[in-house]
Amino acid sequence: MEVPKDLKYTQEHEWIRVDGKKAVIGISEFAQEQLGDIVFVELPEVGTQIDQGNPFGVVESVKTVSDLYAPAGGKVTAVNKELETHPEQVNSSPYENGWIIEIELSDEKDLDSLLDADDYSEQCKNEME
Amino acid sequence: MATSSNLKTTPLTAVHKELGGKLVPFAGWQMPIQFQGVMQEHQCVRDGVGIFDVSHMGEIEIQGPSAKSLIQKLMTNDIDSMQDNQALYTLMCMENGGVVDDLLVHRFTEDHYFLCVNAANTEKDFQWILKNAGSCNATIRNTSHETAQLAIQGKHSEALLQKLCETPLSEIRYYHFKKEKIHNFASIIARTGYTGEDGFEVYVDAGHAETLFRAILDAGKEFDLQPIGLGARDTLRMEMGYALYGNEINEESRPLEAGLGWVIKLGKDEFIGQAELKKQKDEGNRRRLVGVRLLDRGVPRPHYRILKNGAPVGELTSGTFSPSLNTGIGLCYVSPEYAEPGTKLEVEIRKLSVPAEVVKPPFFPTRVKKD
């Protein structure tokens, strides 16, 4: 299971890739695997303010509906429109083509409470048991 | 919540784990919801052939001089005209017209039958039949625990199963069956299914299930056979608009409103529920079960509200994403004024009203081998 070292993670299986004030958010390899075939992603509008720990969108597989939780607060600066026609990219490429939103961070301190790759891998292992 | 320890297992549960199946609780059973993935498994059945373990389904055997009259009294469909080796879809209703279960009657001979019933209803059905049998001259046995059921569905199902049995399967017509050996095990091979594809449902002793399952998997390699989970079983049945007990029909629903009038033979001999169903027919439908198809993105789910110009007019009994149509589909009861195909409605998905239209199921053309 791929857990890139350069990302931070939430306990709810979102990842965040920070680049200066901007950050890209998606769901992990583990999450897409657990959800199964993703057939719909509900995206927020660009410009929406999202708050750390609160739902900002929804991802649906054939059998399940799951909220997406914001790893950090900020303003949405871009959404992955390709997921409207190709939601399966979240399955096939969770860390690249399956990215979900980009935000401008409100407060970089939000990142301090997130899991690093090792801790997140450990959590996934525990959930598998 | 049910834990895996108090869930029933089929003779194939260990094999499912070995094959990478994701096991979930379903109707008191531990069943595989998926193996490779619902979309891919769905397509496997539509394009080729898949195998399902449906051993959770119940089997009830009825034998004796009064078997026929008992079944005739219990069922809404007319079993009088059934031939040996024929299967028939029917409802079993209460006096008030509510549905105890929907099931298949299989006739071995005029005084020997077996019923295939829904997993969650097996014990309830068995008790219902015993209660209504009274002292009639028939032996009624719940054989579910000793019977495994495999469904082999898809256009290659006949060629695949033919490799393992001698009797020419082409002679088994739709909704007929034969008692024959498969891979040397005594089986009942029925040309029935719940997918809309040509296919078979095979009943075999639980003790032989694993060997037979593995033999079929092996024989199926040349057809790219895959094991299929309950997730795809549901998307396949939904595309056909088939009713699911517990969703479209239950003890409170009116089967005529569910479009099941074709299995309610009001003119036959007396049966339980007949008077009330006649009355309901004369009164006319207050509402009708219709198919809805989303006209925009989204996945409809059971209990989502159906709106007309923003006002609620019903709720979905079933809803899912249709892999074949690449769109959301659902079933719901609406008043007759909204039941015409083409009627524009909306499905409320979270805070959004997603446009939808009424369609007459099946949503996707069936390819069963009708005579």
Image (cartoon, grey):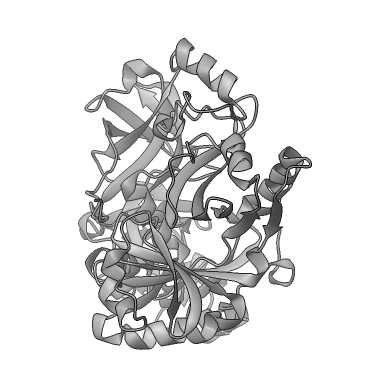
Which residue is rendered at x = 58% and y = 51% of the image? B111
Q: Classify B55 as above or below B13.
A: above
Asked where in the image residue B165 lies, by quadrant, the reply is: bottom left
Please give the name of the residue rendered at 79% of the width and 42% of the height, measured from the top-left corner.
B135
Residue found at the very far right of the displayed protein: B135
Whether residue A105 is visible to the viewer of this picture, yes or no, is yes
Q: Is residue B281 left or right of residue B176?
A: right
Residue B326 position, x and y percent, is 24, 53
Residue ID at (40%, 48%): A49
**In the image: residue B136, left or right of residue B12:** right
Question: Residue A20: horizontal and vertical position, in percent?
Answer: 33, 71
Say which residue appears at 39% left-offset and 33% top-offset.
B262
Percent across and percent down for residue B164 are: 36, 83
Question: Residue A127's quadrant in the figure?
Answer: bottom right
Name the foreground residue: A40 vs A96.
A40
Q: Kindly tell me whether residue B302 is visible in this rendering.
A: no
Which quadrant of the view contains residue B220? Answer: bottom left
Residue A109, horizontal then vertical, whole percent:
51, 67
- Up-down: is B151 above or below B357? below
Say above or below: B282 vs B277: above
Q: Quadrant of the N terminus of chain B?
A: bottom right
* Residue farthest along the top direction in this orientation: B283
Q: Nearer the viewer, residue A24 or B305?
A: B305
Number of marks in the image? 0
